[in-house]
């Protein structure tokens, strides 16, 4: 009996060792970070305490001016949300991944993170993208110009449909009356997420675009494949 139990124990142990070895063999090797080709577009959302808005504006202006002077910076804009002026977005374009990564280690980036941490209402939220429907890189205007930043989330199986819809909206909207910029970009870590950045000369132009046939068609197409609410936010440039 003891011999039989011993043999059974050895057999069970060998089976367990085999199962562990097989599981280890099937565990995928972690993927290396992807190499991003071309320009990198970032949208950084910052929300400070309402009583700290002035400090937030000062910190963001310092950051913007320093970032613009860095190698590889193609554009850096700071905007404040209409109706909720303690909420901001930083819209940047970097020449390539090398410039973007170098900026992430810069003194300006470190100082901004430190300052925002002290006065934040919510964590800093940075979205990194590649361009999929973009135009010229000139900076946008200030004054009455309205920046519209929209986060578009589609379910993963409809990623390609979402991409096609964003591209079509850009083609239909760029150059419309009152349009200054219309960019569609795709997140690098979640390719079923997109950001649409628009600049319109004034609020009247924004309203006209919202009623345009191309915009309504885009929203109709997006409805069945949406993974989250359509998150559209309006801003004005921080001078």
Image (spheres, grey):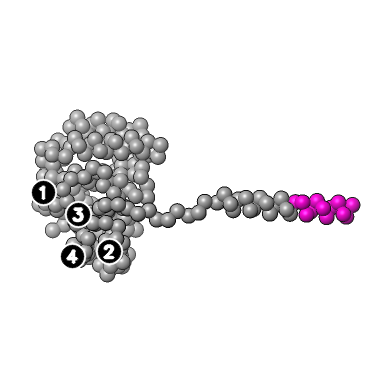
Mark 4 to mark 3 CA distance (whole Å): 19 Å
- Disc 1 marks which residue? 144
Residue 133 in the image, given as x and y percentages of width and height = 23, 42
For residue 16, above or below residue 161: below
> Bounds of the magenta span?
1-12
Mark 3 to mark 2 CA distance (whole Å): 20 Å
Tell me the quadrant of the picture where the C terminus can be found: bottom left
Q: Nearer the viewer, mark 4 or mark 1?
A: 4
Question: Considering only order in the chain, which callout, 1 or 3, is on the residue closer to the N terminus?
Answer: 3
Query: Considering the numbered disc 1 on the image, is that residue within a helix, a strand or a loop?
Result: loop
For the residue carrying disc 2, how many other residues have a C-alpha within 10 Å: few (<14), some (14-19), or many (20+)? some
Mark 2 to mark 1 CA distance (whole Å): 30 Å
- State the mark number for residue 69: 4
Residue 11 in the image, given as x and y percentages of width and height = 77, 51
Q: Which residue: 37% across, 36% down?
A: 158
- Disc 3 marks which residue? 79
Say which quarter of the image contains residue 160: top left
Q: Nearer the viewer, mark 2 or mark 1?
A: 2
Question: Considering only order in the chain, which callout, 4 or 2, is on the residue closer to the N terminus?
Answer: 4
Residue 204 seen from this side: no
Asked if marks 2 and 1 touch (Cβ < 8 Å), the reply is: no
For the residue carrying disc 1, how many other residues have a C-alpha within 10 Å: few (<14), some (14-19), or many (20+)? few
Q: Which residue: 31% across, 55% down?
A: 126
Q: Which residue: 13% across, 42% down?
A: 179
The furthest residue to the right: 1
Mark 4 to mark 1 CA distance (whole Å): 26 Å
């Amino acid at each position: 009996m003891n011999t039989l139990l011993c043999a059974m124990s050895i057999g069970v142990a060998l089976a367990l060792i085999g199962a562990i070895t097989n599981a280890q063999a099937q565990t995928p090797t972690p993927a290396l970070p992807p190499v991003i080709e071309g320009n990198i577009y970032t949208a950084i959302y910052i929300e400070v305490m309402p009583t700290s808005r002035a400090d937030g504006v000062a910190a963001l202006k310092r950051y913007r001016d320093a970032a613009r002077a860095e190698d590889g910076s193609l554009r850096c804009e700071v905007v404040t949300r209409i109706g909720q002026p303690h909420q901001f977005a930083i819209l940047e374009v970097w020449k390539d991944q090398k410039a973007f990564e170098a900026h992430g280690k810069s003194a300006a980036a470190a100082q901004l993170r430190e300052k925002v941490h002290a006065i934040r209402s919510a964590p800093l939220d940075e979205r990194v993208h590649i361009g999929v429907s973009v135009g010229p890189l000139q900076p946008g205007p200030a004054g009455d110009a309205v920046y519209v930043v929209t986060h578009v989330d589609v379910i993963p199986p409809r990623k390609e449909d979402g991409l096609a819809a964003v591209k079509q909206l850009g083609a239909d909207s760029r150059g419309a009356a009152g349009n200054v910029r219309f960019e569609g970009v795709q997140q690098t870590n979640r390719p079923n997420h997109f950001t649409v950045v628009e600049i319109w000369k004034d609020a009247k132009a924004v309203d006209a675009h919202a009623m345009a046939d191309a915009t309504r068609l885009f929203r109709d197409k997006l409805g069945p494949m949406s993974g989250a609410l359509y998150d559209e936010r309006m801003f004005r440039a921080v001078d």
